[in-house]
């Protein structure tokens, strides 16, 4: 089942105080203290919560079997009483459930789905298979320690009536220019591991953002090189480097990117607070946007949700 391209965009319904958020754990099991703290943050935002029993399952490093984890996702999408879905934690395991998801149900019951890190596989597949706008943002366990900036970005992306505009915090312009296209991306390691599968990423005509944690420069080089050789970046409109936390000095990573894409002409910029750093803004996946290196902004021309 090859991930489809050019599906019509499906917008989820805007999240409002009093709405109900369902929690799923499509990847690794989690620290319960952080999980409970994250639930408290969501409650303080004014949301009701539904935590299915299956979320607490454990199977080695996973939050239950592949079938169990996929079933929770399917059930939350199918349940009209659930207004949005937030993932408990990343880790590993999201790619293992992609073939078990009911994309027809998801397409017919579109709703907000949020997470990052390993959840990038789920976010990409949901958008590619259905056209649904998904959200790269905090998980329940990272909300436990989220600062006000992250919380405002989270609620803004999911609830705002106006289009989002993201500003680079520590801008590094690698190649200047302006690009327009749908935003795609996520964790580099996770997206790289989809290469060669039925859900292999294709980023043609998109603005791609990538981020990672704990990867040496040569491994980042290896992953980007593999994806480029596989054609994942053919026709890319623009490239954004998010946080590369615990990956050593950033300058060698910039050099890898500069060398790898030296024959291309699209703009490349770093410095947006996306990923495993202290700041992790919520970014709509699949929504058209414009990257402007002169203004150091990523601007969307419409809200990510519908009333």
Image: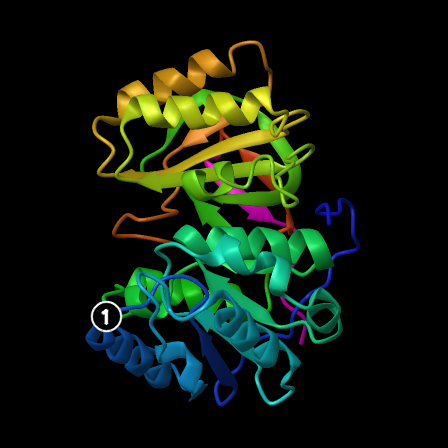
Q: Is residue 283 visible?
A: no
Kindly identify the residue that appears in the image at 31 percent across and 49 percent down. Answer: 276
Viewer-closest of 231 and 303: 231
Would you place residue 287 above or below residue 225 in this image? below
Secondary structure that dominates the magenta span: loop
Kindly identify the residue that appears in the image at 56 percent across and 75 percent down. Answer: 71
Kindly identify the residue that appears in the image at 28 percent across and 21 percent down. Answer: 251
Location of the C terminus by quadrant is bottom right
Does 11 lie within the magenta span?
A: no
Image coords of residue 141 (percent x, y): 30, 68
Q: In the rendered image, which quarter is residue 44 located in?
A: bottom left
Q: Magenta segment range?
A: 295-307
Write down the residue under mark 1.
Answer: 31
Viewer-closest of 235 and 16: 235
Tell me if 162 is positioned left or right of 251 in this view: right
Image coords of residue 271 (percent x, y): 36, 36
Within 10 Å of disc 1 (Cα), the crowding (few <14, some 14-19, many 20+) is few
Q: How many marks?
A: 1
Viewer-closest of 134 and 175: 134
Kindly identify the residue that appears in the image at 25 percent across and 63 percent down. Answer: 147
Q: By what rule are the colours in the image chosen?
A: rainbow
Would you place residue 245 above or below residue 54 in this image? above
Does 297 lie within the magenta span?
A: yes
């Amino acid at each position: 089942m090859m991930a489809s391209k050019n599906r019509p965009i499906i917008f989820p319904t805007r999240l409002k105080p009093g709405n109900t958020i369902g929690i799923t754990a499509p990847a690794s099991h989690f620290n319960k203290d952080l999980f409970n703290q994250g639930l408290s943050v969501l409650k303080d935002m004014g949301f009701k919560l539904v935590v299915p029993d299956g979320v607490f399952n454990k199977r080695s490093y996973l939050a239950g079997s592949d079938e169990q984890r996929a079933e929770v996702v399917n059930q939350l999408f199918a349940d009209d009483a659930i207004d949005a879905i937030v993932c408990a934690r990343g880790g590993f395991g999201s790619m293992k459930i992609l073939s078990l998801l009911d994309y027809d149900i998801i397409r017919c019951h579109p709703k907000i789905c949020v997470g990052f890190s390993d959840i990038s596989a789920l976010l990409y597949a949901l958008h590619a298979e259905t056209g649904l706008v998904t959200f790269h943002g905090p998980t329940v366990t990272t909300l436990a320690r989220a600062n006000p900036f992250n919380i405002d970005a989270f609620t803004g992306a999911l609830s705002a009536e106006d289009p989002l505009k993201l500003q680079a915090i520590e801008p590094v312009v690698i190649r200047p220019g302006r690009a327009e296209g749908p935003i795609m991306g996520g964790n580099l390691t996770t997206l790289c591991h989809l290469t060669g599968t039925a859900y292999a990423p294709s980023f043609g005509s998109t603005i791609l953002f990538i981020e990672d944690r704990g990867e040496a420069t040569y491994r980042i080089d290896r992953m980007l090189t593999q994806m480029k050789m596989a054609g994942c970046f053919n026709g890319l409109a623009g490239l954004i480097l998010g946080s590369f936390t615990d990956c050593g000095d950033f300058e060698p990573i910039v050099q890898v990117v500069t060398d790898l894409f030296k024959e291309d002409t699209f703009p490349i910029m770093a410095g947006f607070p996306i990923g495993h750093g202290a700041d992790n803004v919520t970014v709509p996946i699949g929504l058209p946007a414009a990257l402007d290196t002169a203004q150091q902004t990523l601007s969307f021309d419409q809200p990510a949700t519908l009333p």
